[in-house]
Amino acid sequence: MVKGKTPHVLSFINLKGGVGKTTTAVAVAEILALEARQRVLLIDLDPQTNATVNLISEEAWDELDRSGRTIAQLFDDKINHHLEPKFDIERAIVRRVSTVNGGIEALDLLPSSIRLIELQDHIPGIAMMGNFTNNPLDILKKALQPVIDRYDYVIIDCPPSLGTVTRNGLRMSTGYVIPTIPDIVSTWGIYQIVDNVRRFAADIGQTIEPLGIVATKVQKNNLHDRVMNDLAHGRLGKFNAAGVQQPRFFESTIPLSVNVARGADHEADLRTLNGKYGPQAYVALQVLTREIWALCEANSQ
Ligand SMILES: Nc1ncnc2c1ncn2[C@@H]1O[C@H](COP(=O)(O)OP(=O)(O)OP(=O)(O)O)[C@@H](O)[C@H]1O
Ligand SMILES: [Mg+2]
């Protein structure tokens, strides 16, 4: 990356839970850092902390949480602005994370915390708390300013909603990726996401490009085939009806993988990307990462 150039900031979003947002975001971050030799920061915006505990041990996370080194503390400081602020971005970023390779040199993590669940409802009211300089949607972006130009890519794992926390992620995003299981319920809300993000971006005078939709947990059955065929031809239901162009469908589709499903049960498997994702899903995730990378590089020409 040329110094002074801003990084590509990509949010992984779907309103539906359990569709592979975290798995895809973490894998793309790992592959970009390990194989494309990009400097990557993964931000976990979900109070479920799935991306965090995918990349660091629960003991390490517990210590970070107790010492205020998660994004929950960032928002806590703004909500309880009369108290001495505790969040320090340099101390919160965990360097060289991942189960593979004993940690990936170019991959850093800004961890989340379950404490965000109680805090998130208070975030919209921050500007009303006598703290008028704080736009509640700008908190994450401002906090990242001192470190952002160290990275080529920032990958944001969002919770399954478009609430204030996700909007903090979108506020600093250049684009977003929509992981979805190729079935009816999982693809149902995709039009709403695209419409909502487009209106949000227009409101804040910014471009947030939908990079594409990626099929996850793909199985060989008629329903998945049919939905993927519609996606590949830009024919997802509500887009047609509304006359709005559907975002591109990534050529790489991520198969259902026993390795991913059984997760951390098999520690030995987690030491390589091939073992962590299983051979088929790993290749698919590599191809997806290349597609995302090529699009981002083309956008910055
Ligand atoms: N390709 C895959 N093959 C098998 N299991 C998968 C695959 N992708 C994800 N999973 C499993 O499905 C579950 C949900 O995946 P993941 O956590 O990535 O989804 P999510 O969209 O981030 O969920 P949430 O909305 O709760 O954050 C997890 O148990 C994960 O291990
Ligand atoms: Mg998740």
Image (cartoon, rainbow, N blue to C red):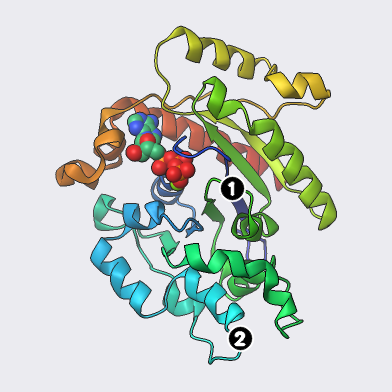
Question: How many C-alpha atoms fall within 10 Å of the one at disc 1: few (<14), some, or many (≥20)?
Answer: some
Confirm whether residue 24 shows in the render.
Answer: no
Q: Which residue is farthest top?
A: 222
In the picture, which quadrant includes the N terminus?
Answer: bottom right
Kind of residue at disc 1: Ser
Q: Residue at the spot x=33%, y=56% of the render?
A: 53
Q: Position of residue 76 (x, y in %)?
A: 53, 77
Tell me if label 2 and label 1 are in contact, CB under 8 Å: no
Task: Return the mark for residue 161.
Answer: 1
Q: Would residue 110 be found to the left or right of residue 127 on screen?
A: left
Q: Position of residue 301 (x, y in %)?
A: 73, 46
Residue 100 placed where, x, y %?
Answer: 27, 50
Residue count near mark 2 (Cα–Cα under 10 Å), binned few <14, some 14–19, many ≥20: some
Q: Is the C-beta of the residue carrying label 2 under 8 Å from the nearest atom of ligand 1?
A: no
Q: At 56% across and 21% down in the image, what residue appears?
A: 184
Instruction: Label 2: state its secondary structure.
Output: loop
Q: Which residue is mark 2?
A: 81
Secondary structure under the numbered disc 1 in the rendered image: loop
- Distance CA(mark 2)–CA(mark 1): 26 Å
Residue at 26% x, 61% y is 57
Relative depth, front residue between 276 and 80: 80
